[in-house]
Image (spheres, rainbow, N blue to C red):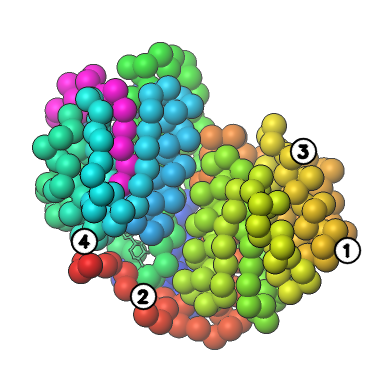
Amino acid sequence: GSAEKGEFKHFMLKEIYEQPAVMKAVLEGRINKGHLLEQAFGSEAGALFDQVKQVQIIACGTSYHAGMIASYWIEQLVGIPCRVEVASEFRYRPVVMPQGTLLLTLSQSGETADTLAALREVKDRVIGTLAICNVPGSSLVRESDLSLMTNAGPEIGVASTKAFTSQLVALMLTTLALGRRNGLSAEREQQILVELQQLPELLEKLLALDSEIEAMSAAFAEKHNALFLGRGTLYPVAMEGALKLKEISYIHAEAYPAGELKHGPLALVDKDMPVVTVAPNNAMLDKLKANLQEVRARGGELFVFAGQDQSLKQQDGISVIRLPAIPTLLEPIAYTLPLQLLSYHVAVLKGTDVDQPRNLAKSVTVE
Ligand code: G6P
């Protein structure tokens, strides 16, 4: 059953390896003839989505990082404003909810105290509420107008893995539902759905990098700090990579948007501070390369998860793991998996309690 580890040493590793299947499960029954079936969100979904003028996303922890990625997608593909905030901040400040706001909560458990409280706080001031959640019948789902289940199956490891990548797929489906009302063509929708359906195959290819990533992890075991860099949707991915590393390996890790490197963190870079970068092939690659040179010039050791661009080469002080070709919109989903494996292997080397890291809980149901 899914509550057993089977051949895996830890639940976290099992859950990382379940991701190809989970990508299938979250799409199951939600696509028909190349189009999204928006009834998947609930019978009232169509009428509600028609009225949405902006989106406010609320979440905690890993779910918050998924929300950050979605905000890039919504502004890019739907073209309506999207804000994202951690629930513990949102619930305690006077917030302005412009007319036509859809409140979108994200939660693996559906029981996170701050997220629930934030929902209850503004429920009456928004046009509707949508919960993207992994637990059917959870409080968040029961108290929201609409819901979309992530169908990832039980997640036991405290550090969230498959719940996150399945949230991203659910968020892309949400983006399409809003997009088709805001000028996103049926053709583009179909194209994106085709890409999403390639995820199981793509994630299998990424899992095949496991031993290469395991070998890389040795360089982190003795370190006390690490810096993660990314741009665009890969900035939240860098945040998620840093969060995974600190949660289970207890190494202090921070993420920065690569362009902010010069505004502070560069002062910390030396040979004892590994810098992990997610660097795909996009318009920002040249800028990212300049950032990497800045790190290298200060003796910092670089660990780059790179796309197909061959100009980023393995050399002294720069370890490169080359990822297979990835459609741009899938980059945040795809680049997350190798970072999960990296923190997993570092934690195993350090001998920590991977599935139940000290001081952390799977679900924070009290404040
Ligand atoms: C805890 C867990 C995290 C999770 C966060 C939000 O901190 O340890 O893994 O991301 O809660 O949980 P949720 O269930 O709301 O996604």
Task: State the CA–CA distance, disc 2 to disc 3.
Answer: 39 Å
Question: From the viewer's perspective, is residue 299 above or below residue 167?
Answer: below
Q: If the image is split into quadrants, where does the N terminus sit?
A: bottom left
Question: From the viewer's perspective, is residue 97 above or below residue 354?
Answer: above
Task: State the CA–CA distance, disc 4 to disc 2.
Answer: 15 Å
Q: Residues within 10 Å of mark 1 (few under 14, many from 20)?
A: few
Residue 255 % position (x, y): 57, 57
Which residue type does callout 2 highlight?
Leu
Residue 234 % position (x, y): 57, 46
**Disc 2 residue: CB within 8 Å of ligand 1:** yes
Q: If the image is split into quadrants, where does the C terminus sit?
A: bottom left
Which residue type does callout 1 highlight?
Asp
Which mark, by number, is residue 340?
none
Highlighted range, magenta: 41-58
How many badges with numbers are in the image? 4
Which residue type does callout 4 highlight?
Ala
Q: Is residue 246 visible?
A: yes
Q: Is residue 348 left or right of residue 19?
A: right
Q: Residues within 10 Å of mark 2 (few under 14, many from 20)?
A: few
Dot 3: what SS? helix
Q: Is residue 158 left or right of residue 243?
A: left
The residue that mark 1 highlights is 316
The residue that mark 3 highlights is 286
Question: From the viewer's perspective, is residue 318 above or below residue 103?
Answer: below
Task: State the CA–CA distance, disc 2 to disc 1.
Answer: 37 Å
Nearer the observer, 205 or 160:
160
The residue that mark 2 highlights is 360
Residue 172 falls inside the magenta stretch: no
Q: Residue at x 52, y 77 (%)?
A: 250
Which mark, by number, is residue 113?
4
Circle 3 or circle 1, nearest the eye: 3
